[in-house]
Amino acid sequence: MNHETYDNAYISGILQSVRTIAVVGASANDVRPSYFVMKYMLDKGYRVIPVNPGQAGKEILGQLSYARLGEIPGPVDMVDIFRASGAVPGIVEETLSLDPLPKVIWMQLTVRHDEAAARAEAAGLQVVMNRCPKIEYARLSGEIGWNGVNSGVISSRKPVMRSGFQSYGLRIKPDGRDNG
């Protein structure tokens, strides 16, 4: 697979199919990007499990943290990697030892490892590299456009303003069609 660019339908399909995300390299520091991503994805209804040996047994954003992926009770749909690219092969190997296997390995912005990605894909996992699920969700839902950012997603869907937290949900279906 070409990991330079991703179709909107590919990213949207992943974000619509996963419910449980393990964030490897999660931080309890509220100014770290992994903290923001965890908070955003929790707010969108995902179950997010922090993985950080230094925080194991403690809570991050109300979620119990684990030292390793293998310690998480129950299945994980996606492993989101917030570690340096050099750590990716070991994380992919640990991921491939899980039963059942997750559906997705997602590597955050600036994180890329082509050999580990190929290994994960050969095992049947979908792979995303050098992208952020928070940014992609906001882009595909149209939320990022609220701030004047060109998301590249065109929709005729009219915003419905309600009280409380605003969310359109993902607009792009896995088949590439707009939900609007």
Image: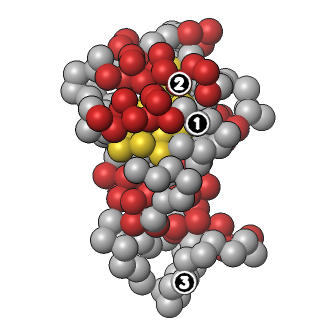
User: Residue flagged by tag 2: what amino acid is it?
Assistant: Val
Residue visible at 33% across and 66% down in the picture? 174
Which element is circle 2 on?
Answer: helix
Per the image, the residue denoted by label 2 is 88
Which mark is nearer the camera, 3 or 1?
A: 1
Residue 77 in percent (x, y) is at 33, 37
Which element is circle 3 on?
Answer: loop
> Where on the picture, by quarter, is residue 142?
bottom right
Residue visible at 35% across and 59% down in the picture? 13
Report, in whole angstroms, how far the alpha carbon at label 3 lies from the one at label 1.
29 Å
User: Residue flagged by tag 3: what amino acid is it?
Assistant: Ile
Q: Identify which residue, 77 or 164, lies in the foreground.
A: 77
Q: Which mark is residue 112?
A: 1
User: Residue flagged by tag 1: what amino acid is it?
Assistant: Arg
Report, in whole angstroms, how far the alpha carbon at label 3 lies from the one at label 2.
35 Å
Which mark is nearer the camera, 3 or 2?
A: 2
Residue visible at 44% across and 35% down in the picture? 117
Q: Identify which residue, 113 or 77, lies in the foreground.
A: 113
Question: Can you say whether 95 is above or below 53 in the image?
Answer: below
Residue 95 in percent (x, y) is at 37, 23
Q: Say few, some or many: other residues with alpha carbon within 10 Å of mark 3 (under 14 / 14 to 19 / 20 or more).
A: few
Question: Tag 1 or tag 3, which sits nearer the N-term?
Answer: 1
Question: Tag 2 or tag 3, which sits nearer the N-term?
Answer: 2
Report, in whole angstroms, how far the alpha carbon at label 2 lies from the one at label 1.
8 Å
State left or right for residue 79 relative to residue 83: left
Per the image, the residue denoted by label 3 is 154
- Tell me, yes or no, whether the two marked residues, 3 and 2, touch with CB atoms within 8 Å: no
Q: Quadrant of the C terminus?
A: bottom left
